[in-house]
Image (cartoon, rainbow, N blue to C red):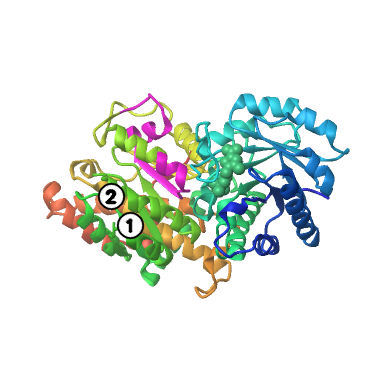
Amino acid sequence: MPIDYALYLVTGRDLLPPGQPFAATLAAALEHGVTLVQLREKTADTGEFLAVARETKAICDAHNVPLLINDRADIALAVGAAGVHVGQDDMNARDVRKLLPAGAIVGVSCNSADDVRRAIADGADYIGIGAVYGTATKNVKNPLLGPRAVGPLLALLDGTDVRAVAIGGINAGNLARTLQGSVSDSGHALDGVAVVSDIMASRDPAAASAKLAGIVKAFKEGRAASAPSAALKVEDLLDGVVRVMKVVKEINPLVHQITNTVVTTQSANITLAAGGSPIMATAPEEMDDLAKVAGAVLINIGTLREDVVRAMRVVGPAANLSRTPLVFDPVGVGATDFRKRTVKELLDAFQISVLKGNAGELAAVAGSNEVRAKGVDSAGPGFADPAWFVRGLARKEKTTTLLTGPVDYLSDGVRAVKIANGHEILGRVTGSGCMLGSLVATYCAAAAHVADVDAGFDGETSRAGSAADTVRGDMLVGALAGVLVLSIAAEKAVARGDVYGPGTFLPALMDEVAGLTPGEVRARARVEVV
Ligand code: 3NM
């Protein structure tokens, strides 16, 4: 039987909700997207293990899904299972294989590069990489990897037939990030994910499985669909900008913004000026509801506080679940250890759609020493090759990346442009970068709407299944629209006779954003492919 690793259920009978029969959970999971099962029994004696294995095998057979047995080749043989999964403390893959019939599947748990190399050398068919996130299901002694440490392990499998799944704390909220964030620099992606509690402990294992299976399927289809063409025409991008500007005025997207206390009012106002509808909620209790209805979400970490971080932890996975564009502005991330730690944690926990920052901030996110930060500002002359840097960071974080400065650079990892609009006065008022984040989020909401319209969805159909990627819409166009609107409005504002300096500039900027037409943006845009 061919093995499909897409959604791998590892059992844990102790996690079943009270009164829920194991067989019912298993059958529901198999009927709703689970493609492979591992029976994992850590406390049962041999007789009980065998009895459960027989029952499990019969249910898996009825659904045509292969069964693997954790650790015990004897049980696998007794029930005719497809193979065995071993951990680092169990018999090694080579010895297990000797006990099993030809063609049996052998999988190995791996946490490090050494584990992966050994599994390859021992002839494993697949590896389980974990633990990615914290989990209460298993007493994990090794370091938690986070999705971004999975890619380098996947790269070790390049050129082999060894398949890979990730495991540990994976649920529907972090699944998109797990899949996207773990793609290696060489383009190696996970074959699937393994979950225990998200299905086993669920009162509705059918819905839980269907949700997970849908996200894996969307990710795989998104990768199979043609990559964005590197042959990029500025005119096409500007057509896109014109369209999203019009759409914002038509649909007035709700833009949910968790931002800092310095800029909240002006960020809300600039969103309104562009045609969006801002909501600046920060209470963790509201986050689930808002992520479902918002056209886009902005997370800005200026004036960061732990209670607001709690809200960010909720809103990110919720936005991923509804495939809502998520713009991330790591304000002043280089300034303190708290901000650095928080950004690392958040970027591991959910998939962002656009990352925006100045040179100091993005250097800190990338772990580059090339540019230093001074508080929330950059210090020094910037990157020697900003286009190369921004394209590389976009690839690494699997997100459209916007590097702001006197000239702005924008890339989705394939396409890259530079934008030469703007005015130095933007650096003399506080929060111009934050307002840019608000505008980017506003136009990304429109870009997502455009994608839904083009896919034939009418707003009534569930958008969760409406396109073959984890984010809907062209985020490069959304981000470009934000940059052009703010910078061209700034150029127009400073040219006015009633603007004498930063004090009179800010209200004039609001007016110019409100009055700016798509035609003016197209005519004044100074965009170049790089
Ligand atoms: N193996 P849940 S983590 C069985 O790191 C197992 O190898 C892990 O359970 C590893 O999906 C883990 O409930 C438990 O977090 C995963």
Q: Which residue does the numbered mark 2 point to in the structure image?
A: 307
Image: 273 above or below 434: below
24 or 187, which lies in front?
A: 24
In terms of secondary structure, where does tag 2 sit?
A: helix
Q: Mark 2 packing: few (<14 Cα in 10 Å), some, or many (20+)? A: few
Q: Bounds of the magenta span?
A: 345-372
The answer to whether residue 216 shows anywhere in this view is yes
User: What's the amino acid at mark 1?
Assistant: Pro
Callout count:
2
Choose top left, top right, bottom left or bottom right for residue 187.
top right
Please tell me whether residue 364 belongs to the stretch shown in magenta. yes
29 or 126, which lies in front?
A: 29
Residue 63 lies, in percent from the top left, at 77, 61
User: What's the amino acid at mark 2?
Assistant: Asp
Residue at image coords 43%, 48%: 354
Residue at image coords 65%, 54%: 221
Choose top left, top right, bottom left or bottom right for residue 461.
bottom right
Residue at image coords 17%, 57%: 507
Which mark, residue 284? Answer: 1
Q: Mark 1 packing: few (<14 Cα in 10 Å), some, or many (20+)? A: some
Residue 45 lies, in percent from the top left, at 70, 44
Marks 2 & 1, CB-CB < 8 Å contact: yes
Residue 225 lies, in percent from the top left, at 65, 52
Which mark, residue 12? Answer: none
Q: As drawn, is 438 to the left or to the right of 460?
A: left
Please tell me whether residue 48 belongs to the stretch shown in magenta. no
In terms of secondary structure, where does tag 1 sit?
A: helix
